[in-house]
Amino acid sequence: MYQERLFTPGPVEIPDRVREVLGRQIIHHRTDEFRQVFLEVRELIKRLLEDPSDNFVLFSSSGTGAMESAILNFFEEGQKVLVVNGGKFGERWLLLAKHWKLNVIEYSVEWGKSADPERIRDFLKEHPDCMGVLLQISETSTGSYHPVEEIAQVCKESDALLVADAITALGVYHIRPSVGIDVLVGGSQKAFMLPPGLSLLWFSQKAQDRLKDRAFYFSVRKELNKQKEGQTAWTPAISLILGLKESLSMLLEEGMDKVEKRYRAISEGTRRAIRKLGLDIFPEIPSISLTAVKSQDAEKIRKELLKHRIRVAGGQDHLKGKIFRISHMGVSDKDGLMLIGVLEVVLKKLGYSVQLGSAVAEYSQALMESGLW
Ligand SMILES: *Cc1c(COP(=O)(O)O)cnc(C)c1O
């Protein structure tokens, strides 16, 4: 039987070049060999972020670990923060910030909508003691994009640190934190096309000046001192770091401008094909990392796709049964076409009036117009 194909927004499929490295015998981490690889990885991260500073650390954890670390290392109990809550991951910021007893103001964004920078400007004016704005760049649960650059402009005028969860954005979008992001969170099993288990936390000078010592395992200061020298405070996820060297090299060899263009083309092609099939796109401003599709038959469609050994994700919480989500992360332009072809068949079998080949043609047309094909 064929291998199941993952079109899920985490984990995503792992490129062969990365898998080859992951399959090797482990090396010891307290060695020059590891130190050299780790320092190379750090150089690649600097190139990825176009920031020559050493202000970032890797943790052995899923993405949420780095989110928690952001809260613990840059904020204190009782400090006021604004949380943009527009989905499952916005809600996670809310839960984390409340857990660590920050004084949380919630900016509740209807699921599928995007944050309005003007609203954030008003919030910050009303609350000049607000020390942070926490958001997702790509809200994976709804497929929405929050306009981080505009929001960064707003935050720059205040004391607030802009804390951006880029777990499904970094490695897809050409993100330069110098636009005004203060704390940036990345994770391995999505845009970096690795297994889960590594997270990244980058921070600006403005954030560094506020570094706290509240965390133990997730201490930025402890890790940074070691990581600058090519070592880690605790046992690192050695294999994943070797894999990260490959996936970052792949992204940088292509160039982040081209990577973003490719994801733009694939996501645009997918959206056009979906509309051709008579279905609607759920988010108002779609992320290019994934496409959330609105349908009362979402679960039926998802299960039919599984029979073809294609796995997409369903909706979460109140969106369960109302949307399904197609990830573009780690998916090639050709595989995107394949998915649309199978989706046509699935919908036709479910009784939709579909002309086979019509959505495939729309996808191809979009990719040709984009210049990618
Ligand atoms: C997946 C994801 C996370 C982190 O989830 P983990 O399961 O801890 O890796 C956080 N934010 C976003 C936007 C995500 O997509």
Image (cartoon, rainbow, N blue to C red):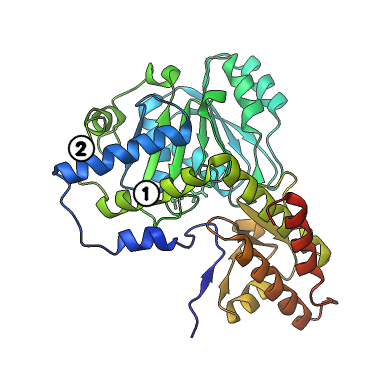
Q: Are marks 1 and 2 in contact (CB under 8 Å)?
A: no
What's the residue type where badge 1 is placed?
Leu
Q: Quadrant of the C terminus?
A: bottom right
Residue at 53% x, 30% y: name it.
176
To which residue does mark 1 refer? 244
**Disc number for residue 283:** none
Question: Of marks 1 and 2, which one's residue comes earlier in the chain?
Answer: 2
Residue 247, image x and y in percent?
42, 51
For this view, does 54 lie left or right of residue 8?
left
Between 205 and 341, the one lying in front of the other is 341
Residue toward you, 112 or 195: 195
| Mark 2 closeness class: few <14, some 14–19, many ≥20 residues within 10 Å | some
Separation of residues labelled 1 and 2 (CA atoms): 19 Å
- Report if the beta carbon of the residue with label 2 is closer than 8 angstroms to ligand 1: no
Instruction: Locate residue 170, reporting x and y percent.
Output: 51, 42
What residue is drawn where x is 29% and y is 64%?
23
Local packing at callout 1 (Cα closer than 10 Å; few below 14, some 14-19, many 20+) is many
Q: Secondary structure at mark 2?
A: loop
Residue 233 - label:
2
Q: Secondary structure at mark 1?
A: helix
| Front one among 315 and 27 | 27
Is 359 placed left or right of 221 in the picture?
right
Whether residue 201 can be seen here: no
Q: Is residue 368 left or right of residue 135?
A: right
Type of the residue with mark 2: Ala
